[in-house]
Image: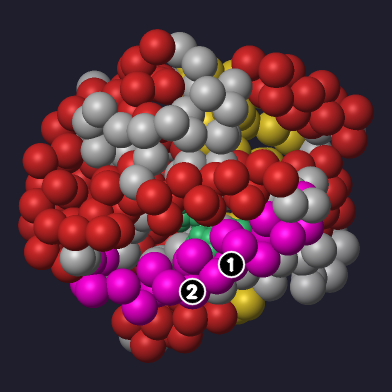
Amino acid sequence: MLCEVEGVIVRLGIPARLFATLLWILPAKMGDRMWRWWYQRLAKAKAWGKFGYMNYGYVDDDKPILIPEDEKDRLFIQLYHMNIRDIELTGKQVLEVGSGRGGGANWIARTYAPESLTALDYSSEAVKLCSQLYQSQVNLKFIEGNAMNLPLEDSTYDVVYNVESSHCYSDMGAFIREVHRVLKPGGQFAWTDFRDDKRMRIIHDTFLEVGFEIDKQVDITEEVIHALDEISDDKKHRISQGTNRSIRRSFETFAGVKDTPVYNSFVNGSLRYYRYLLTK
Ligand SMILES: C[S@@+](CC[C@H](N)C(=O)[O-])C[C@H]1O[C@@H](n2cnc3c(N)ncnc32)[C@H](O)[C@@H]1O
């Protein structure tokens, strides 16, 4: 959640500042390893407990109906729901890339009944955790893998989706080509994440160069800011309980708590959050 370092380093906590500086100065591939280290750590972090989601959330007028146990995760689920809302998933072969703590994949697998949902993440610890937490969901499996070199066959999936993960990837072009490769002809790709204007323009052009058609392209920054506003106090409280003081500010930055650099970048427009729906 804090890869976009230009202009936002100054007010990070010290560990986050070190992390962002290293991301900036080291070769891009080292950045992949650093993100992996961070998410390995988060898969075990007390601050996140059994929490199934690590995204910024989304405030929606078109709310999904949720079972009571999911209500506490509504804003995070709504980001997933927004991303896949125009796609038919029932009976389909579906892939999530960057599934994190697995809450989103589990919700989609049980709500939309795809024939199979493969949820892939770079963090072996996250995959281990999810495989235990969600083992009863029979159409869902978690695997370890790298988004830029997917350990999957060509033309296998009807749908690939990706939620707030790709800002960690050192080579976005490689990821887009890999998604195109594993999709069946006519398959759909639902992508949502944040970028500055310059990088977003490059990604937009890459979608087209790789051979995708763009069906939808929406700026959802306002809805994400509203979600961050709604959950800021709760996140702050959770982080204060689960972390010691020296790393608290860094966790808050990572989580997009109000008045931390990434949050402020959304508010001042230097980062914007997007949704794209694409067809192969
Ligand atoms: C901010 S979390 C979002 C997780 C989940 N999509 C959610 O919304 O809760 C980003 C996830 O991307 C994963 N990730 C980062 N780099 C990756 C890579 N190269 N390949 C696959 N997953 C990656 C991280 O391990 C982490 O679980």
Q: Amino acid at mark 1?
A: Arg
* Residue ID at (26%, 59%): 246
Per the image, label 1 sits on a secondary structure element best described as helix
* Residue ID at (10%, 64%): 241
Asked if the stretch drawn in magenta spans residue 35, the answer is yes
Q: Indicate whether 165 appears above or below 190.
A: below
For ligand 1, tell me if the residue under mark 1 lies within 8 Å: yes
Q: Quadrant of the C terminus?
A: top right
* Residue ID at (78%, 70%): 152
Q: Main secondary structure of the magenta part?
A: helix
Q: Which residue is mark 2?
A: 40
Q: Indicate whether 187 appears above or below 271.
A: below
- Residue bounds of the magenta highlight: 28-49
Q: Which residue is mark 1?
A: 36
Asked if the stretch drawn in magenta spans residue 268, the answer is no
Place of residue 172 in the rendered image (x, y in percent of width and height, measured from the top left): 76, 42
Place of residue 203 in the rendered image (x, y in percent of width and height, measured from the top left): 74, 28
Place of residue 36 in the rendered image (x, y in percent of width and height, measured from the top left): 58, 67
Residue 141 visible at all: no
Quarter where residue 245 is shown? bottom left
